[in-house]
Amino acid sequence: MLWPVVKALLGHYRRHPLQILLVWLGLTLGVSLLVGVTAINHHAQQAYASGERLFANPVPYRIRPKHAETKIPQAFIFNCAVMASSNAFHLIFKK
């Protein structure tokens, strides 16, 4: 039952050899497109998960006193803010 189908296909491709090349090219391009889309989807899922973890805790670094009853001096916080802004200024406007 299968042999007449194979015989007909071989006869067709013997008369039209360019079509078998085009079928092979189409299959190759289809598989490469599938692999590329799968890789992009995997990367997008990882990036989305990473962003979700980042925004789940928007302030990962905090300045806290060692003991709950003590307070952080206001001058220390001000100096940290000034140092951070000056470092950011130098990074943005490199001279």
Image: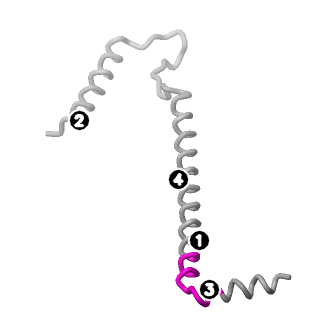
Give the mark, 1 or 3, whose residue is nearer the N terminus. 3
Residue 58 drawn in magenta:
no
Q: Earlier in the sequence, mark 4 or mark 3?
A: 3
Residue pointed to by mark 1: 27
Lower sequence index among marks 4 and 2 = 4
Q: Earlier in the sequence, mark 1 or mark 4?
A: 1
Residue at figure coordinates x 56%, y 86% from the top left: 17
Q: CA distance from mark 4 to mark 3?
A: 36 Å
89 versus 81 height, above or below:
below
Q: CA distance from mark 1 to mark 4?
A: 20 Å
Q: CA distance from mark 1 to mark 3?
A: 16 Å
Q: Which residues are magenta?
A: 12-24
Question: Which callout, 1 or 4, points to the residue nearer the camera?
Answer: 1
Circles 4 and 3: CB atoms closer than 8 Å: no
Q: Nearer the viewer, mark 4 or mark 3?
A: 3
Q: What secondary structure is marked by label 3? A: helix
The front one of 89 and 17 is 17
The numbered disc on residue 92 is 2
Q: Check residue 22 for magenta coloring.
A: yes
Magenta highlight: main SS: helix
Residue 40, label in figure: 4
- Which residue type carries mark 1? Leu
Number of other residues with Cα within 10 Å of mark 2, as a class: few under 14, some 14 to 19, many 20 or more: few
Q: Give amino acid for label 3.
A: Tyr
x, y (%) of residue 72? 42, 14
The amino acid pointed to by label 2 is Ile
